[in-house]
Image (cartoon, rainbow, N blue to C red):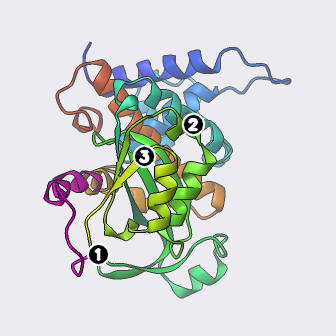
Amino acid sequence: MTTDLNTLLTALYVKIDDYLGRRTRPGRPPKLSDAELLTLAVAQVLLGVRSEARWLRFVPRALPGAFPYLPGQSGYNKRLRGALSLIKRLIRVLATDTDLWDDPVWIVDSTPVECARSRPTVRRSNLAGWAGYSYCASHSRFFWGLRLHLVCTPAGLPITWALADPKLDERQVLMAVLDHDPTLTATRLGLTIIADKGYASAELDRYLAERGATLLRPSYRNRAPRPGEHLLKPIRQLIESVNDTLKGQLDLELHGGRSIDGVGARIGQRLLALTAAIWHNRATGQPITRSLIAYDH
């Protein structure tokens, strides 16, 4: 099987269509099915076209014949915002269809998702009350927006994720995410979670120990290093590499969302594209699991 965008989109469409099955909702079926909508959304992210209006003009030339019907920009935007719950489910469906899902090691971190810069935009934004100001030490800058909390395997396969107010404690968000889906830890004996020193907490250590998981993290400078701590640094850099893929190749911070549903759908759209690429790379035996080069042109 060749590794190119058309092959990935075909395999993805078939996978989604098989998962969704026959439509059971009453009324006239949409001209663009849910399987076509999400395949179209993944293609948009992989090809790096951020403007939805420009994307819909670009599709007939970039993917001739692939989508017999294309909605207008407002219709596409509305359908995509309404598909957030479906996007979340499909990320899980694709992730569990890979051998990476059972990896006993997770890495976790949060990264800024900027949503506005100017003060007037912040004041009138629909995200007020959810987004907020915070400081990103990694980039030495303040930002207004959210934080993406991502739990993934060392290969970059998303396990679970959440968008939260940037002022919320990373440790509390991680516990809330795992409480929301307790099956994630219940089915994994001997799970190891690797994080940075920002996750240092006796409460979090107890919480994970009760669920049979172990948290590995660096110690603060004023404390004695833990045994084997020097081995954590290259593994912790993997989550930075995943964030770099999301931001550098999938334009995570250039999402363009202006509402809660809009931001959620666009972040989910990018995580779905990353998951789909990893899923397809594993299925086709590619040497680099998270490579997007074959699909970005």
Residue at the (44%, 23%) spot, across then down: 97
Q: Tell me if residue 266 comes above or below residue 83 in the rendering.
A: below
In the visual, does 226 lie left or right of 94? left
Residue 213's mark? 3
Please state if 180 lies on the left or on the right of 55 as rendered: right
Note whether 286 is above or below 114 in the view shown: above
Q: Is residue 296 inside the magenta stretch?
A: no
Which of the 4 image quarters holds residue 263? bottom right
Mark pair 2, 1: CA separation = 35 Å
Disc 2 target residue: 183
Q: Earlier in the sequence, mark 3 or mark 1?
A: 1
Looking at the picture, how far across and down is residue 180, in whole percent? Answer: 62, 48
Instruction: Mark 3 vs mark 1: give the one in front.
Output: 3
Count up the numbered dots. Answer: 3
User: Which element is circle 2 on?
Assistant: helix
**Structural distance between the alpha carbons of marks 3 and 1:** 31 Å
Is residue 154 something that shows in the picture? yes
Q: Amino acid at mark 2?
A: Thr
Q: Which residues are magenta?
A: 220-239
Q: Which mark is residue 139?
A: 1
